[in-house]
Image (spheres, coloured by chain):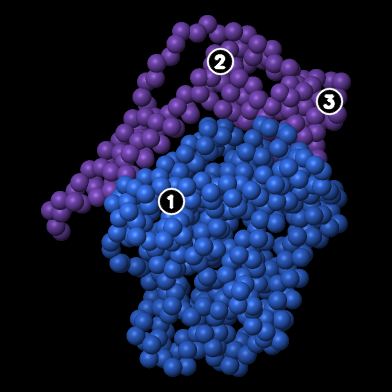
Chain colours: A blue, B purple
Amino acid sequence: MTRTKLELTRFPSVKRLLTSRWVPWTLMAITLPVFLLAILTGLFGTPAGSRNFGIIFVWIVWWALLILVMVPFAGRLWCAVCPIPAPGEWLQRRALVQSRPGGKLFTLGGKFPRRLKNIWLQNAAFLAVALFSVVILTTPFVSALVLLFMIVLAMATSMLFERRVFCRYICPVGGFIGLYSQVAPIEVRVKDMAVCQSHVEKTCYQGSDAGYGCPWLVYPAALDRNTYCGMCMECMKTCPHDNVGIFLRAPGKDLQTTQGRRLDEAYKAFIMLTCALAYSIVLLGPWSLFKESAYAVGTLAWWVYASLFLAANLVIVPGIFFACTTFARKLSYNKFSLRRTFVEYAYVLVPLGLVAWAAYTISFVFVNFSYAWQVVSDPFGWGWNLFGTANWTWTPYLAGLQTFLQIPILLVGLIAAIGMALRTANSQGVPRRAALPVVTFCAAFTVGLLWLYV
Amino acid sequence: MNFHLPHGRYYRYLIAVSTVCLMFAAIFLPLPVDAYTPETHTLQINARTFAFEPGSIAIRRGDTITIELEALDAVHGLYLDGYDVNLVAEPGKSASVTFVADKDGKFKFRCSVACGALHPFMIGELNVEPDIPLVRALLITLMGVIGALAFFWK
Ligand SMILES: [Cu+2]
C-alpha cells in the first residue's frame, strides 16, 4: 500500500481558510436560518408535504447532498456546518466568532455517564426516528417537531455537559455519518506524532487563547479513523506547532485495519444496512399494505410492522450475519472469539450499507427534486411566489435512468465489501476461505436490492 | 520510470482488467430471445389515496398496452418512468393512454398529482418481461464477485 497523502493545508490559502474563525460561523449562519425556516414552515405551513419547504429541503435536498455527496466524499464535513449544535455551542462559548481566553466554556460541565460513552444511544435514536419515518418524512408538522426537539436537546446538553456531547453520543444522524465517513478520501490528522508526544500542554484537547479544546472529545494525535472527528478545525487553530493538517488519502483507508472495532459500531452498520433494505421495500416498493401499516401509527397493523421492523434490525439481519461468522470460524479453525470475529467482519457492511443508501436515495431524490423549485418560492405553501418558480410543474429528472447509476454504485460497494472480508480473514491469520460466508451474505444482499430496483 | 512490474502486481492488474472486460461483455452479450407474438392488453388501474391497484403489473415486451386510470377518491396521476407517460384522472373521469411496451425491465409508476401525505410513495411497478436488464445486472454482479475474489485473494 502506498502511504502517500496529499496535505491540503500545505497550501497557504487553504490553511488560512480553514483556520479562520469566520468560516464555520459564516457557514452556520447560513444553515441555521434555513433550518429554522424548515421548522417554521413545518409548524405553520401547508400540511401537504410536497408543497412544504421543511419536508422538501430536509428530506430531499439535504438528504441527497448528505448521502450522495458529503458523506462519501467529505466524511463529517456536514457536522462542521450543522446548525443543530450551533446555538448550544454559542451559549457554551458566550461568543459567536472569536474565542474566549483559554478556550473556556460556560457550562455546568457535567461528565457524560460513562456507560453512555459509545454510540448505543445514537443507534437507539436512529431506530426511533426510522420506526416513525413514514410519518416524519411526509408530515411537515411532525417533521418540524423532530427538528425542534433535536435543537432544544442539543442546547440542553450543551448547558449540562462539556463540549459537543450531543453530536458525539446522542445525535441520531451523527452515528451513521461517523461510521460512513471512514469511506471518505479526506482526513484531519496530526503530521508528526513525535511533536504531539513532546507537547505537554495538549492545547488541542485543553483549549488555549487561540481556540477551544476538541469539541468532539477527541485527542487529535490519537486519531486513526474519521469516525469521531467533526472536522471543526479547532485543533488546527490551537496547535502551537502547526502540526495538524487536512489530507487527501485513499478512500476507505480507515477500514483497512481491524484495530479498535466495536460492537456498538457494528450494530450501527447492521441497522443502517437493514433500514436501507426496509425502506427500499416499504417506501419505494409496489406493496401498499406495507406503506399503510407503517403510516397508521398505533393500529394493530402498525404494531405488526413495528415489531417486524425492529426484529429485522436488531435480531434477524444481525442473526443471519452471526450465522455466517459462526460458519466462517468453522471453516478456518479461527482462534479468536466468536464475538470478535462477528464484530470485525461486521465492518464490511460499511461500504455495502453506504451504497445501499445511495441506491435508495437515487430512486426517489431525482424524480422528486423539482418540488424544490416550488417550495423555494412558496416555502409555507401560502401562495407566495418569491422567485417566480412557485408554479413550476413537477418534472421527474432521470426517470427510468436511475438503474444506470444504481447498478455501478451497488457493485462498487459490493467489491469493496469483498475486499474487506478477505482482508479481515487475513488479519485474523486464517485462510481466505473463512471470508466466503460473509462474501455470500454481501452478494445476496446486493442481489436482493438489484431485484427490487432493476 | 520502472515498467518492470513485480509478478504479483502484474497478476492483479491482469485480473482487474479482465474482470472489467467481462463485466462490459455482460452488458452487450446477446441473450437468446424466444419467439413471441405481441399481444394487446387493456390494463385497468385504480388509484386511491395512496395506492395503485393492482400495484404490480407484468406484460411482455412488444405488447401494445392501454392503461386506463380510474381515480377512486381524489385527483391522482400516473407517471411511468422510462416511458414518459403521464396520465391524470379525476373521480368519475378516467384517463387512458395506449403505447407499445418496447423497453424491457422494471419501471416504477408514481402518482404525479400531489394527493396527500404518502403521495411521494404512491408507487406501482410495470414489469416488461423478460427482465433482460436484471439478467444482465446479475451477470455483471457475478463477474464482479468472481473478479473481486480473485483480485483480493492473492
Ligand atoms: Cu395520488
- Residue under numbered circle 3: B72
Q: Residue at x 55, y 35 (%)?
A: A453
Q: In this view, does A322 lie above or below A242?
A: above
Which amino acid, by three-letter code, is at mark 2?
Answer: Arg
Residue A206 or residue A307, whichever sits in front: A307
Is the CB of mark 3 within 8 Å of ligand 1?
no
Q: Are dots 3 and 1 on a single chain?
A: no
Q: How far apart are marks 3 and 1 (CA)?
A: 51 Å
Image spot of residue A17 (x, y percent):
51, 75
- Residue under numbered circle 2: B60
- Residue under numbered circle 1: A325
Callout in the foreground (3, 1): 1
Q: Residue at x 81, y 25 (%)?
A: B71
Image spot of residue B23 (x, y percent):
35, 35
Is the CB of mark 1 within 8 Å of ligand 1?
no
Secondary structure, mark 3, is loop
Q: Mark 2 lies on which chain?
A: B
Looking at the figure, which quarter contains the N terminus of chain A?
Answer: bottom left
Residue A211 or residue B73, whichever sits in front: B73
Q: Distance between the residues labelled 2 and 3?
A: 28 Å
Which amino acid, by three-letter code, is at mark 3?
Answer: Leu
Residue A264 or residue A188, whichever sits in front: A264
Q: Is residue A258 left or right of residue B88?
A: left
Which amino acid, by three-letter code, is at mark 1?
Answer: Thr
Where on the picture, by quarter, is residue B79? top right
Secondary structure, mark 2, is strand
Residue A24 in sight from this viewpoint: no
Q: Distance between the residues labelled 1 and 2?
A: 42 Å
Secondary structure, mark 1, is helix
Q: Which chain carries label 1?
A: A
